[in-house]
Image (cartoon, rainbow, N blue to C red):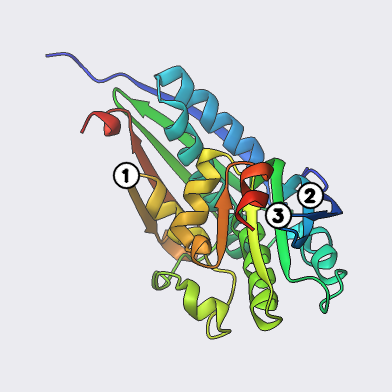
Amino acid sequence: MQTETKARVDQLNSPAGHPVAVLRYEGDIASTSKDAVLGTYQSLPKASTKLVLLDFTKVDYINSSGIALVIQMLIEASNSGQKVYAFGLSPHFTKVFTMVGITKYAGLFPNQAEALAAL
Amino acid sequence: MKEAKTTSVEVRLPSRLGYEKVAMSTAAAVAKLMGFKDERVEDLKTAVAEACINAIEHGNLLNEGLSVGVVLSSVDDALEVKVIDDGKGLKTLPPKPDIDRKIHGEEDPRGMGMFLIQALVDEAEWVKGGNGRSSYVRLVIRLDKDAE
């Protein structure tokens, strides 16, 4: 019933020249998304990945279990000295992420261009 | 005096994660028919989804032999949603989640559902069923919230 979560990684450079790992998600972000959300993040080389950008443009449904996976990623990123940012959330999920406090640890941007420009 | 007209819609879900989306879609359809704005429909969808997930996971303990009942009742300017399971109900409401404590490993990263429900609808109450069964959460979302 839940749409399978797909994830892929793009390695980009910000206009300022910083390497950025972009994790692009597609489908639902729910309890079944652990491999896609955390597994994909954990596959990034810790030493060379300092900036992580999450692309939610093709995500329609995020529930509290999915939010918990994002928080687990933020915990690991914090412990590894990485910075996490996100873009492409709908206005509703931007509100939800703000309500639960994720914006304190992950900057949100409307789109990829604005996110990269800030990094 | 004008009498309030009540319209009810009922859905029964299997206790399987993912089926909360059926209740979400139904609640959204009813809310749209009542004239709720898109933003409020999205709030309702998330609140209903979280209530159903709690009922499936914690009320019915993922027992697929049990179902979750969802009753949507519209009365004039308000939509009431009851999500009913076969659990004993909550002893106490969990504390408000604290993102700082979560990030520092002092609190479980999970546990956002009930906070979201309370934050997104106008009323939320958890009611214990008699004989330790048929507990429910009752949500109310009002049509005129934006005008207040």
Which chain does tag 2 point to? A
Q: Amino acid at mark 2?
A: Arg
Q: How far, Cα to Cα, is label 3 from label 2?
A: 6 Å
Judge by depth and name the residue closer to the eye, A75 or B18: A75
Above or below: residue A114 compared with residue B94? above
Which residue appears at 38% of the width and 45% of the height?
B121
Q: Looking at the image, do the residues carrying marks 1 and 3 touch, with CB atoms under 8 Å apart?
A: no
Q: Which residue is mark 3?
A: A54
Which residue appears at 43% of the width and 72% of the height?
B94
Q: Amino acid at mark 1?
A: Asp
Q: Is residue B69 left or right of residue B73?
A: right
Disc 3: CA contacts within 10 A as few (<14), some (14-19) or many (>=20): many
Which residue appears at 58% of the width and 39% of the height?
A90
Above or below: residue B75 compared with residue A69? above
Which residue appears at 77% of the width and 49% of the height?
A25
Q: Are marks 2 and 1 on the same chain?
A: no
Instruction: Give coordinates of residue A79: x percent, y percent.
Output: 67, 83
| Corner quadrant of residue B19 | top right
Q: Which residue is mark 2?
A: A24
Judge by depth and name the residue closer to the eye, B90 or B65: B90
Check disc 1 and report its element: helix, strand or loop.
loop
Q: Amino acid at mark 3?
A: Leu
Judge by depth and name the residue closer to the eye, B43 or B104: B104
Q: How far, Cα to Cα, is label 1 from label 3?
A: 32 Å
Q: Which residue is mark 1?
A: B122
Q: How far, Cα to Cα, is label 2 from label 1?
A: 34 Å
Q: Nearer the viewer, mark 2 or mark 1?
A: 2
Judged from this view, the residue extending furthest toward the left is B1
Quadrant where the N terminus of chain B is found in the figure: top left
Instruction: Give coordinates of residue A68: x percent, y percent.
Output: 63, 65
The reply to whether residue B13 is in sight is no
Which chain does tag 1 point to? B
